[in-house]
Every structure is written in C-alpha cells, then in structure tokens.
Amino acid sequence: MKKQILRFTDVTYIYHTVRGETIAAQDLSFSVGEGEFVAIIGPSGCGKTTLLSLAAGLLRPSAGTVTRVGSCGYMLQKDHLFPWRTIEKNIALPLEIKRQNTSEHRERAKNLAVKYGLGDFLDSYPSQLSGGMRQRAALIRTLATEPDILLLDEPFSALDYQTRLNVTEDVAEIIRSEGKTALLITHDISEAISLADRILVLTKRPARVAFEHEMDFGEVKNPLKRRETGNFSSWFEILWKELNI
Amino acid sequence: MKKGQLQKNFSSEHVLFLKKRRRRTALVWALRIGVLLLVLAIWELVTALGWADPFFMSSPSRIARTIFGLYRDGVLFYHIGVTLWETLAGFAIAVGLGYGIALLLWWSDLLREVLEPYIVVLNALPKIALGPLIIVWCGTGSKAILFMTVLVGIIVAILHMLSAFIATDKNKLLLLRSMGASKWQILTKLVVPSSLPSFISMLKVAVGMAWIGSIMGEYIVSRAGLGYLIVYGGQVFKLDLVMSATVILCILAAGMYFLVALLEKLLVKNTEN
C-alpha cells in the first residue's frame, strides 16, 4: 500500500452564520496516496471549496480528523498573481512567506519556470502575459516550495475553452513529470476524467463520498489522448448519472 | 505572446489617427486658455467701462496691482508661506496619522467594531463647530489652525484607507493564508501594496481637505496667511485683497493637486489586474 499523504476520517463540517447553521460535510472519509492524482466532483454548492480549505488546514473540522503529511500548495480558479510584482517575484512569494527565500530555493523556482517556458517572462508583469501563461506561472508559484500535495480548486474554470484544454495539458504534464500528488476539485466531469487516477463523486450537501472509481486508461496519462479513447465517453455517462442522483 | 508591444512602422492611417489626436489635444488646450482670457477680458472691460463697480467687483488689473503691492511691501511670500506651511503640515499629519489608525482598525476587528459609531459621528460633525473649543485648547496661534487642518483631514483619511484595506481580494487572502502567511506578512505583502491606488486617491481628497482646514482655521483665529487676508479684506471692504488672496489660493491648490497627480504617475504602474 502506498504512503497516504492526505486522509479525511469521518469529517463533519458545520458553517455557522447568524441565520443558522449549514452542514457542509458529514462523515466524509477518503484518502490520497503518494504520487496519486485524485479528482473530486460534486453537484454545485456541495461544499467543494470547504473541503479544500479543510485539507489545507485553513478550517478545522467540527468532528472527525484531517491528517496531512507534509506541506500543501493551493491553486485557485484565477491565477491571483500580484500585479505589482514581476513573474519572478510572484513565483518567489511563497518562499518569502515560508522564510525559505534563500538564493538556492529561488534558483530552483527560477529553473522550474525556465523549464516550463516562462524563462522569457521572468521580468514581465502579469498584465503582459496571456491567461494561459499566467495560470502556468501560478502553478510554478505553487510548486516553488515543493509541496507534498497540490490542492487544485477548479484551476482552469476561468479560462476560455481552447486555452483551458492547453493549460490542462500543460499542468498535467508538469504535475506528472514532477511526480506530484494532487487533489483536484471540479464540477467539470470531462476534466476530471482526463486528468485523474481516481475519481470521487460527492453527494449534495451535506457532502459524503457517494461513488469512487479507479480510472482504467492504463498508461494513457495525456488529457487530450484520454479524451480520444472509447472509455472516456462511457466514464462520462456513468459519472453524469451518478452526479444527478 | 507578450501583449502590448506596439509596432514601430505605422500605417498611413495610424499616422493620420495620431495627427488627429494631437490636433484635438492642442484644440482643447487652446480653448481652455481662451476661456480664461475671455473671462478676464470681459471682467476688465465691464469694470473699466463702469458697467460694474470695481469697488465691489475688483478687476484683473486691480488684482495684479494688489498682488504686486503685497510683494513690494515684502509680505506676499510671508502670507503664502504661513498658509502653505499650515496646510502641508496638517496634510502630512492627517495622512500619516490617518493611515496608521486605519491600519490599527484593520488589524483588530474588535477595535473596529467598537470605534465605528464614534468615527461615523466624527465624520458627520461639521468640524467648524469645534472652533471655540480649539481656540480655548490651543490658543489663537498657528497651533489652533494646524489642529483644525488635521481634524478636517484625518477622518476622511481613516475611512478612505480602512475601506480600501477591507476590500482586499478575499481569494488573494486565502492564497496567502494557504501558504501559512502571518498577519504581518499579509499586511506587508498584500494589503499595503494592493491599496496603493486608494492611497493616491486618498491623498487627492486629503489635499482638498487640508486647504479647507487651514483656511477655515485662519478665518477663526489667525493674524497671518491667505485666509487671514481674505477675512481682513472682507472686514475693511478691500475686495481687491479678497480677490487677490483667492486667486493665489487657486494657484497653490492646483499646484498641490498637480504634485499628487505626478506622484500617482510615478507610483501606480503595475496595479491593474
């Protein structure tokens, strides 16, 4: 059995507002193993972002436990690059925050940026980059501190369709070749199928794991190639039905 | 894929477009100056022909003579200096202190909630109502005027910056917190730099407030300054003096606003998203 990087055990989370309380998740259990790419899909408003905040340790569960080995890197829907910083400075941001801003770490982050095609843009400001390049820069920023798990909160949903396919391709390639563990949360079924090793389907609020599937694409890891296979459409049909139960 | 790179060899259509733009700008400036000259000319003419009494209306030539007279008596720059000093010092204190207080209120939610009603009341209160109190507390010197100037500017500065700090992008905050950022890091890496455009717009408002404060202060207590000249001129019916001081005030206020606008150009380069 693989080493588990992230584990949710019977997690319940309750939101409190003045008007009342909402149970966002109840008795939610799952785990993510090292090097695995897990996607979570669920009906809209099922508390997907809450789940990532729990995984990142930004929220504490009302009941149950969340255990995580090592550090995490969070990637959001938009790139949220700071417009007043150059790309190089943006990528160095988590290093500054974690007080790892040594020349060695900076050099490593820079090399990563160069390796994935951002070399010419290190001195540019985010406004000078296209949407796809910006999201790529955001990924390099997330990877700069070498997190043990990547938490991806619908990281492609703000992009237009063509850019989206390209960036998904890029990100999948980078995550695979860096051997990273990743937890992706999305409402996009085809995105989940094209990226993940394993897919969890959540119920409506309160969120629980309703179904779990290992993807059977064998060695086909490339998102676009996966979209061309026959399994793809049958998985889509299965997951579509499960989401609408 | 770099955006915003303009080609250097323009098409003839583009050259024409640029030419039109330049002509337009020149036209606007010519008209602006024309309007000013026209008003001055009509003013001068109407008073010279006796259609309006220059004793009440003054006139451009009389204003020029009055200003030159103040200069000859060696008091022109003294009065300008007094008002300018009060305004600039009051502006600096109001902006600095206001920024600091806004930071404290951002830092502590409890403090903000507790103090909110007091700040709202202080904001609504016409500061001139405190005039007699200020005279008793600070005397009738420039200390009182400075106090008034700070009082007028500081509340606006606090409210303006506080709302900017609070409006910091929630997702960027989430991002920083997910990196494990401390509150101090969130402040220095995100809240302060992202509120820079608001800081500049606050400066623009505060410049206006500082002039209101210093002139209002001089109306109440002073023995020198442009506000004093205006009040004194009004009391002894020297409308030339009133007009002259007002004209100088216009020029100074415009100059200070221009300086802030220049600062904006220097500072705000890469804040657009």
Image: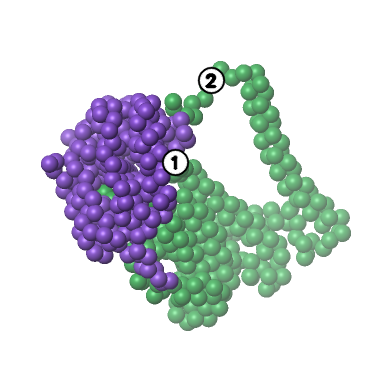
Chain colours: A purple, B green
Quadrant position of residue A204: bottom left
Residue B150 in view, yes or no: yes
| Residue drawn at point x = 46 percent, y = 75 percent | B117
Q: Which residue occupies the foreground of this view, B178 or A40?
A: A40
Q: Which residue occupies the foreground of this view, A196 or B144?
A: A196
As drawn, B240 above or below A49? below
Q: Secondary structure at mark 1?
A: loop
Quadrant position of residue A105: top left
Q: Which residue occupies the foreground of this view, B22 or B239?
A: B22
- On residue B8, the disc is 2
Q: Amino acid at mark 2?
A: Lys
The CA span between labels 1 and 2 is 34 Å
Chain on which label 1 sits: A
Q: Return the x and y of residue B167 as percentages of the image width and height.
A: 44, 57
| Residue drawn at point x = 28 percent, y = 42 percent | A213
| Residue drawn at point x = 69 percent, y = 29 percent | B20
Q: Is residue B268 left or right of residue A141?
A: right
Q: Secondary structure at mark 2?
A: loop
Q: Are marks 1 and 2 on the same chain?
A: no
Q: Amino acid at mark 1?
A: Ala
Chain on which label 2 sits: B
Residue density around tag 1, few if under 14, some if 14–19, many if 20 or more, within 10 Å? some
Q: Return the x and y of residue B140 as percentages of the image width and height.
A: 50, 76
Q: Label 1: which residue?
A: A158
As drawn, B121 above or below A175? below
Q: Return the x and y of residue B260 as percentages of the image width and height.
A: 50, 50
| Residue drawn at point x = 65 percent, y = 18 percent | B12
